[in-house]
Image (tube, helix red, strand yellow):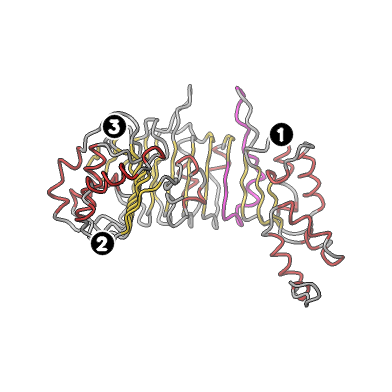
Amino acid sequence: MEAGGPDRISDLPDSVLGEIISLLPTKEGAKTQILAPRWRNLWRSAPLNLDCYDLITSLGDVAGVVSRILSSHQGPGRCFRILRGFRDYEAANVDSWLQSPAVDNLQELRLSYPRKIQSELPLLSESFLRFSTTLRVATIEHCHLLDSIVQGLQLPQLRQLTLSNVWISECSIPHVIAGCPVLECLMIIDSFSFRCLRINSISLRSIGVRAEYHEDELNFEELIIENAPCLEKLLHLCDGGALHVSVIFAPKLETMRCSSDPTKKISFGAMVIQVTKIFLLLAFTTLLTCISMCGKIIGPKLYIQSSSSGEPKNLWLRKHKNFISYHDIRLKKIVFKTYRGTGSQVSFVTFFVLNARVLESMILQIEATNDKEEFLAKHRRKLQLENMASRGAQFQFTTDECVRNVWSIDDARVLDLADLFAC
């Protein structure tokens, strides 16, 4: 708004201004109280968006600030985030905050209990249940989920759920999924006290799991997708651990990431896929062998991260090269992270250069030391770019990061991105 021009914002009703304020970070939302007399009560009556991490200052006593905000706020709750980066609080603070009227009708809750070394995980507060009918997004971290709370849990509007470093029994975790009839995105990070997770959900579209070893605990070792008719993304977000993945029924599955550990296997029905040590295979590449055996179409995006150890062999290519060559490869985008130009990498990339007829773009991320015309010209020749099957495809070498770091995929909300591997 230009100086002296009409004040269009003041023409808006309080309800609209309140919605705008609720979209601001906590500090900025509170600062709107100094704009004009009319704004003094707007923030306190607007839907509350309270992020404890936004309040961290060198002065400390963030827990006291949170308590004062909750005691003075009049409006309904929209979003309440208590994240792991915020440490100035105790489990008793969490219980008190969750009981505050200021968070009535909460829609998003990101709840991380304080983590103390060599101590038992705190219990999830029963106050969590008061949001069961309104929650749409929930992250629960560093706590113990009692069977008595979980097995009767009903979350009819919940669409995104993250369980991170939680203790939950094997008999309870199916109840959590069954109690969320519209759940679309599920992320389970380093949780334990169950060995096997069976997925039966007609609503789930994306699943992400990271299974780390917990000493003296029952560890997560097996994921079975029994019935997931809408599942599109399945991500194993760790290269270690002992997780075995089985897919029985997921007809819409199109994006997959698995461990690059050669001892790990993925089962599709009666078929077992041995993951080679060539790449960290992202979005379809772990399905290549299965696709070649089943005659399915490959596409549309392929993200690859090269292994950093040894000079691997293209075992899948040797075994199924002729079969794949006779099938339509409908890849439109290929991104290769850490391309060093080894023999196996050249062979792998060249295969798609010569066979992907509808390819639109191919990006190879190289090290800065290789960003020289001699290296680039040499590998343009090796990859036979002049014979590309798709004449209109754009080819690019880059030193920029082009594949999302897997450790940044740590929340169910990330799973909802259309292209979650792109930076």
Q: Is residue 277 left or right of residue 58?
A: left
Dot 1 falls on a residue whose secondary structure is: loop
- Frontmost of labels 1 and 2 is 2
Q: Is residue 310 left or right of residue 198?
A: left
- Residue neighbourhood size for the residue with mark 3, other residues' Cα within 10 Å, grouped as few (<14), some (14–19), many (≥20): few
Magenta stretch in the rendered image:
118-140
Q: Is residue 34 left or right of residue 138?
A: right
**Residue 280 in the image: x percent, y percent?**
34, 39
**Residue 301 in the image: x percent, y percent?**
33, 54
Residue behind mark 2: 358
The quadrant in which residue 369 appears is top left
Identify which residue, 167 or 110, lies in the foreground: 110
**Residue 398 in the image: x percent, y percent?**
39, 48
The quadrant in which residue 311 appears is top left
The numbered mark at residue 90 is 1
- Residue 59 inside the magenta-drawn segment: no
- Frontmost of labels 2 and 3 is 2
Identify which residue, 348 or 383, lies in the foreground: 383
Residue type, mark 1 in image: Glu
Can you say whether 216 is above or below 422 in the image? above
Dot 2 falls on a residue whose secondary structure is: loop
Dot 3 falls on a residue whose secondary structure is: loop
Residue at x 60%, y 30% (from the top left corner): 121
Residue at x 23%, y 40% (from the top left corner): 272
- Residue 136 inside the magenta-drawn segment: yes
Residue type, mark 2 in image: Val
Q: Earlier in the sequence, mark 1 or mark 3?
A: 1
Can you say whether 14 is above or below 94 in the image? below
Residue behind mark 3: 262
